[in-house]
């Protein structure tokens, strides 16, 4: 996995600077959402599972509500809708083991902190880890990510969102 992480990080610094991004969600929108979501979710699950759940929901909310202000208008009725319940259920099962997540984070932060500082590296790596885990439920599958994969428009956009 460490080889994949280094490929991801090197590519991210190059790709992230040039990729176009239309998302209106910024770090200043994502961090409070994740913080509050994890705080609430920890009441019913481990912190590790809560983080996975919250990042998963963030991805879904960014798609459903491209403008973060619209996400702030979610009502109790919206939360109880079949569509929203499906989103929630889709995000309730973390896939990677805690050791896999710890390995990813340790390697990623170690490789990224010289280029962006430890705090930004931690935020970036956590964002990428949950996006990768969401796409690759198996840690061994995630280990097969190639440089070519990272150069696709879809991945460039994903990388950029974690750099903002």
Image (spheres, rainbow, N blue to C red):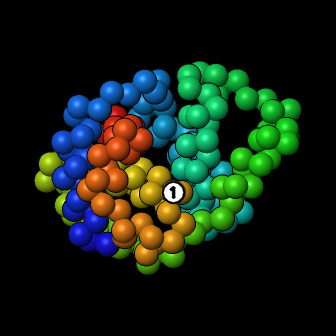
Q: Residue at x 70, y 24 (%)?
A: 73
The N terminus: image quadrant:
bottom left
Q: Residue at x 64, y 32 (%)?
A: 64
Position of 90 with respect to 69 (left or right) is right
Outermost residue, left side: 114
> Relative to 136, does residue 139 appear above or below in the rendering?
below
> Is residue 85 found left or right of 63 in the rendered image?
right
Q: Nearer the viewer, residue 89 or 122?
A: 89
Q: Nearer the viewer, residue 15 or 110?
A: 15
Q: Is residue 74 visible?
A: yes
Residue wearing tag 1: 135
The part of the image, by quadrant, that contains residue 48 is bottom right
Question: 24 and 36: which one is in front?
Answer: 24
**x%, y% of residue 17?**
22, 34
Q: What residue lies at 74% left-to-right and 55% top-to-bottom?
A: 89
Image location of residue 91, percent across then percent down: 66, 55
Residue 162 can be seen in this image: no
């Amino acid at each position: 996995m460490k080889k994949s992480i280094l490929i991801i990080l090197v590519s991210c610094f190059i790709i992230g600077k040039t990729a176009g991004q239309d998302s209106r969600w910024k770090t200043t929108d994502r961090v409070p959402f994740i913080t509050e979501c994890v705080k609430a979710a920890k009441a019913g699950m481990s912190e590790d599972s809560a983080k996975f759940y919250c990042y998963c929901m963030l991805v879904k909310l960014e798609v459903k509500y491209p403008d973060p202000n619209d996400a702030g208008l979610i009502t109790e009725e919206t939360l109880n809708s079949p569509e929203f319940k499906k989103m929630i259920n889709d995000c309730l099962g973390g896939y990677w083991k805690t050791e896999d997540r710890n390995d990813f984070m340790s390697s990623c932060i170690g490789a990224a902190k010289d280029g962006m500082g430890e705090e930004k590296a931690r935020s970036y790596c956590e964002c990428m880890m949950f996006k990768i885990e969401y796409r690759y439920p198996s840690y061994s599958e995630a280990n097969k990510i190639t440089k070519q994969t990272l150069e696709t428009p879809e991945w460039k956009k994903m990388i950029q969102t974690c750099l903002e």
